[in-house]
Image (spheres, rainbow, N blue to C red):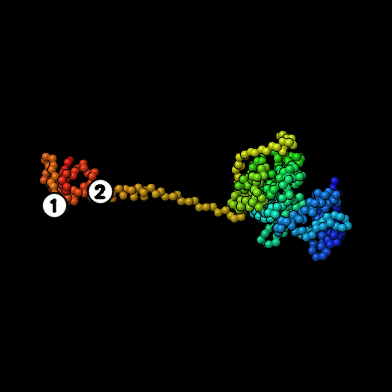
Amino acid sequence: MIHRLELPTGAVVAGDFKVLGPLAQGGMGSVYRVEQLSTGRQRALKVMHPGLLQDAVQRQRFAHEARASALADSPHMVDVVAAGVDEGSGIPWMAMELLPGETLSAVLTRRDTLPRAEVRGLFEQLGQALGSAHRAGVVHRDLKPDNLFLATARAPSEPFFLKVLDFGIAKVVLDSAAGNTAALGTPLWMAPEQATTGGLITPATDVWPLGLIAYQCLTGRHYWRAAEDPRAAGVGVLKEIVVDPLPQASARAAEQSRAGLVPLGFDAWFARCVCRDRAARYPHGAAAAEALVALLADTAPYTSLPVGSPPPVLGLPWAETVSAEAAVRVSVKVSQPVVPPVAPVVAPGKVYGLAKPVVPMAPKAPARSLWPWVAVGVALGCLLAAVGLLWWLWPDDGDDTPVGTLTTREGGTSAMRRRWEISSRRCESAPWWWTGRWARSSTPGACSHVEF
């Protein structure tokens, strides 16, 4: 059992920090509210547990937390004011900015779910924080609601200002080429490569918990069944992480009676975060956060549960067990049918989770057919063509002097003969296909009648 240090009120640490009271307890140290005597400002002072002082690795991690925050250099990282070792007790300490607010874990415990707009704002800021850290080569390795602090907003238009806490087990990417030397992280949130030694740690390691955090923010439930079952042990969570099929987020939400809280398109985003193949995930946290922000900005259906709805408790026994070797070597891929979205839960006169009221669209008038007009146009064109052809072929009754008299069959009248007289112009212009009635003579300018 680790011996925890309890500093009394009024105690002075490092000659400059007067203890005002406790704030929180963690696995590596305790946090106190203190007054910095040299400036008069209140700070948060983190001191290492005395029981870990003889552990060189733990001392190194404690000191690394301050350096990792400095490397990231983001307004969404906690500002470390000073760090050192107390001369009297030999205990490492770290003074940080004191933040008014509460952790995301406390908010979800109190409110169950977050509206889509708040989830979008949370991931906008989280993407900026992880973008700075990953560009600096720092992987957090322990992202979870307890380490996301929603501080009082600096601008009135913002509901909160995110601060990422606890870089104690953060790892510099360049130093992780040899792989993970220990299974570090919180089991509910850590990626498969963190569950075993030798796993390569990259910025994609921080993408895995982003999917799980977003799922809990939207549904108010853990994605893992074992986390919702008070009888399940930690090995049950590890079995789900490494071996069991990973159902779609909408399918798991439906199983937990929360199907209506998952927006359309969330399944694909979640599957690219919570994916055992590290190379198939988003390459870094900023890319994953930007994709979710864009998804939540769309008009995908979304609802919020009425305030005070009781959370369901699932008790699902495991149907089978696997060996530790199988947990490391087996990777199962499954394809689940898409669960159709459930209609939004609304109260009279109010739509939950929508930024703007939905205005019904007026029905469109049926499009008019153009075929009647096309038919009329074709008919008129044919009529004009026929009239023009008849005018061009009709014999000329003018005074042109005939150049040849056409013969007729026996019994032809004089009127018919006059009509059959062809001028040189008409004879020369007779079309080639009119040979059924007229034919040119061998004499130039003359024609002969071949058939009446």
Direction top: furthest residue: 320
Horizontal arrangement in the rendering, residue 26 relative to residue 114 (left or right): right
Residue 336 appears in the figure: yes
Q: Position of residue 402 (x, y in %)?
A: 13, 50
Q: Which residue shows up at 62% across the image and 39% down it? A: 335
Q: Position of residue 92 (x, y in %)?
A: 83, 55
Q: Nearer the viewer, mark 2 or mark 1?
A: 1
Direction bottom: furthest residue: 39
Quadrant into which the C terminus falls: top left
Between 86 and 358, the one nearer to me in the picture:
86
Q: Which residue shows up at 70% across the image and 41% down it? A: 241
The tag earlier along the polypeptide, 2 or 1, is: 2
Horizontal arrangement in the rendering, residue 443 relative to residue 13 (left or right): left
Above or below, 444 relative to 95: above
Residue on which the image places disc 2:
389
Residue on which the image places disc 1:
401
